Image (tube, rainbow, N blue to C red):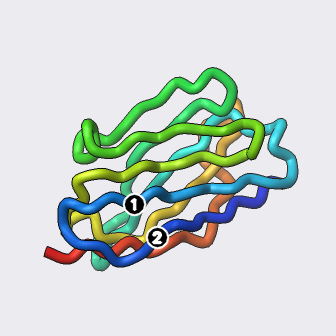
Amino acid sequence: QVQLAESGGGMVQGGDSLRLSCAASGRTLSIFRIGWFRRAPGKEREFVAAITWSGGATNYADSVKGRFTISRDNGKNTVYLQMNSLKPEDTAVYYCASRRLAPPEYDYWGQGTQVTVSS
């Protein structure tokens, strides 16, 4: 199994920055990709960004492109989400999740960290 722990959430004002961390432990050699997702109040969970564990290939949701950057530190088994120019609509609980090469579903999830952006 893989255990994931998010940290770095908080309450900020619009335009501020935050960096979220996702620390992985357990069977990290099985990780192919780690993604960040978020769930805003009253909304469905949505994809934010993802990174391939070994090669570092990334992709982003259109809503965060140019503002958020995902990166990884394999030595620390940690993935980061640098969030700049935050907007009130970025307010949500942010989760990281891992998936193996196959099946393609994200099957391990962290507990989430709250991000609140005030206007």
Instruction: Tell me the crowding category of disc 1: few under 14, some 14 to 19, or many 20 or more residues within 10 angstroms, Cα based.
Output: some
The type of residue carrying mark 1 is Leu
Q: Quadrant of the C terminus?
A: bottom left
The type of residue carrying mark 2 is Gly
Residue positioned 72% across, 36% down in the render: 74
* Residue 68 drawn above or below residue 2: above
**Answer yes or no: do the residues labelled 1 and 2 have beta carbons within 8 Å?**
yes
* Residue 42 drawn above or below residue 51: below
The disc label shown at residue 72, or none: none
Q: How many marks?
A: 2
Residue positioned 29% across, 70% down in the render: 91
Q: Secondary structure at mark 2?
A: loop
Residue positioned 51% across, 72% down in the render: 113
| Residue 20, position as x, y percentages in the image | 50, 58
Q: Quadrant of the N terminus?
A: bottom right
* Residue 18 drawn above or below residue 40: above
Left or right? Give the position of 108 relative to 84: right
Q: In front: 104, or 79?
A: 79
Specify the quadrant of the image occupied by residue 43.
bottom left
Specify the quadrant of the image occupied by residue 73.
top right
Residue positioned 37% across, 56% down in the render: 46
* Residue 36 drawn above or below residue 58: below
Task: Identify the residue position indicated by label 1 in the image.
Answer: 18
Left or right? Give the position of 54 relative to 113: right
Q: In front: 39, or 113?
A: 113
Q: Secondary structure at mark 1?
A: strand
Task: Identify the residue position indicated by label 2 in the image.
Answer: 9
Q: In front: 114, or 39?
A: 114
Instruction: Tell me the crowding category of disc 2: few under 14, some 14 to 19, or many 20 or more residues within 10 angstroms, Cα based.
Output: some
| Residue 110, position as x, y percentages in the image | 63, 65
